[in-house]
Image: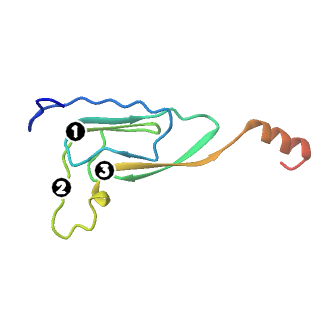
């Protein structure tokens, strides 16, 4: 980016068609605001694992917002910088397909 200096505010937006497995709210650069919003499909369930060293402003089932996230820098005796990032890891737990439920009922399995 041209003419970006220390103290500059840079805007960035990403739109993904697939759910990321990990969303970082904190990196080596500070953020004035960062958010992750996703739509939960009724036939799917997710497990969410948080590493939360900085409090998130909004924390609901499908929406997380971080404000004034400081930059993270390595310090002595730190094993790995990634262990200290504020982030959410998202894992697909299961998918329920309605036709399979009907099949189980028809076969007398459920």
Residue 28: percent from the left, percent from the top?
21, 49
Give the left or right position of residue 70, taking residue 21 as reference.
left
Q: CA distance from mark 3 to mark 1?
A: 12 Å
Label pair 3/2, CB-CB below 8 angstroms: no
Marks 3 and 1, the one that precedes in the sequence: 1
Residue 72: image tag:
none
Q: Residue at x 31, y 44 (%)?
A: 25
Instruction: In this rendered view, identify the residue nearer to me: 102 or 85.
Output: 85
Give the left or right position of residue 103, taking residue 72 as reference.
right
Q: Residue at x 19, y 42 (%)?
A: 30
Q: CA distance from mark 2 to mark 1?
A: 14 Å
Point out the residue furthest to the left here: 6
Instruction: In this rendered view, identify the residue nearer to me: 105 or 71.
Output: 71
Is 15 situated above or below 79? Answer: above
Label pair 3/1, CB-CB below 8 angstroms: no
Residue 31: image tag:
1
Q: Secondary structure at mark 3?
A: loop
Residue 18: percent from the left, percent from the top?
50, 37
Residue matched to label 3: 86
Label 3 or label 2, whichever lies nearer to me, is 2
Residue 52: percent from the left, percent from the top?
32, 52
Marks 2 and 1, the one that precedes in the sequence: 1
Q: Residue at x 45, y 42 (%)?
A: 20
Residue matched to label 2: 73
**What is the quadrant of residue 8 in the picture?**
top left
Q: Residue at x 24, y 29 (%)?
A: 11
Q: CA distance from mark 3 to mark 2?
A: 13 Å
**What is the quadrant of residue 80 in the picture?**
bottom left
Q: Quadrant of the N terminus?
A: top left
How many numbered dots are placed on residues in this image? Answer: 3
Marks 3 and 2, the one that precedes in the sequence: 2
Point out the residue furthest to the right here: 107
């Amino acid at each position: 980016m041209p003419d970006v200096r220390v103290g500059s505010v840079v805007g960035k937006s990403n739109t993904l068609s697939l759910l990321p497995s990990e969303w970082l709210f904190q990196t080596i650069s500070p953020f004035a605001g960062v958010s992750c919003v996703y739509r939960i499909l009724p036939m799917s369930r997710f497990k969410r694992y948080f590493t939360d060293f900085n409090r998130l402003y909004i924390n609901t089932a499908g929406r997380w917002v971080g404000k004034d996230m400081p930059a993270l820098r390595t310090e002595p005796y730190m094993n790995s910088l990634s262990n200290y990032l504020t982030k959410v890891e998202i894992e697909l737990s299961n998918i329920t397909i309605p036709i399979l439920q009907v099949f189980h009922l028809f076969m007398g399995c459920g």
